Amino acid sequence: MTANQETVTKILSVLSHRIRREILLMLCDKGESSFTDLLNALNVDTGKLSFHIRSLSEFIEQKESGKYALTRAGENAVRVIRDVESWAEMPNANGKDSLLRLASFAKRALAYVVDFFVMFALAALFMIQSVVALNLTNWVNWLIVGLNILFVAAGLIWLYSTIMEGFNGQTIGKRLLGLMVVQPDNRKISYEHAAVRNFGKVVLPFDLVVGYVLNDKKFVRYFDKFAGTTVIDLRKKQPIPQQAELQG
């Protein structure tokens, strides 16, 4: 069914104003906020805030307590704003490797550790019945349980990373650290790209060693090169092009 273009234009017009976007993002973060809370946070006058709140009538609602909260449409609007912010933070797709804000190895490793421990905890929960059933006074049983949890965690991290990165280029760890997986020309990766690059996490020592031998800053891991993906740091200042590039 074709969308009503007048409605689309109206929605985009509402979201085009910075203050209205800030109101929606603030309500998303806090859940509910009073008029005074919004007034103090945004540092605007009462009349201006009242105008913007009226403009957001489709996206926010006033509760019985008098506080404002997001409607379902408001929650969807926040997702749109977050996506646009991510696009805006990405480097210009000019194909120049020198302008890529490549993520450091340390930040990539920290993001992986965050994701791994989340998946390890889930794997341990899945395996809890097996753990209870075994006699853990025997160190061999401890070893078996540990290996099984690691095996399940490896499968989970591949599946989880593939879904999350294929959807928006970010896992929980990457989002916390401001990282994003993209193609070297800054285009969004597909689920196929994500599936291939994340297989390397299952064979991580091999992946890192071969990546080190390749010695290409864009591809810290071999499976990044194989999949045609790289990781950028959205919080890093974009490199300034050389004078020759600016003039040429």
Image (cartoon, rainbow, N blue to C red):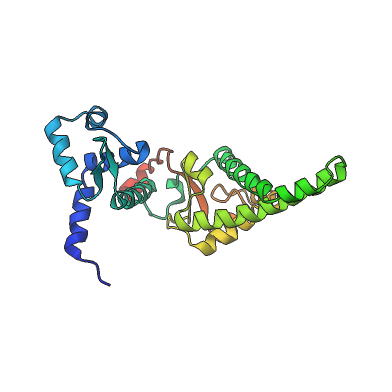
* Frontmost residue, 190 versus 122: 122
Residue placed furthest toward the left: 47
Name the image quarter holding residue 106: top right
Please report the residue visible at 42 percent of the width from the left and 39 percent of the height from the top: 235
Q: Is residue 132 left or right of residue 57?
A: right
Q: What residue do we see at 24% from left, 27% from top?
A: 40
Residue at x 61%, y 41% (from the top left corner)? 113
Relative to 71, say whether 26 is above or below: above
Instruction: Give the image location of residue 23, x and y in percent.
Output: 26, 39
Which residue occupies the foreground of this view, 139 or 66? 66
Residue lying at the far bottom of the rendered structure: 1
Residue 182, horizontal then vertical, whole percent: 47, 54
- The location of residue 72, given as percent across then percent down, is 31, 52
Nearest the eye: 132 or 55: 132
Q: Nearest the camera: 15 or 38? A: 38
Quadrant of residue 241 within the rendered picture: top left
Image quarter of the N terminus: bottom left
Q: Is residue 246 left or right of residue 35?
A: right
Residue that sits furthest to the front in the current view: 64
Q: Is residue 64 left or right of residue 139?
A: left
The residue depicted at 49 percent of the width and 58 percent of the height is 166
Labels in figure, total: 0
Name the spot of residue 189 as percent of width and height, x first: 47, 59
Q: Is residue 234 left or right of residue 62?
A: right
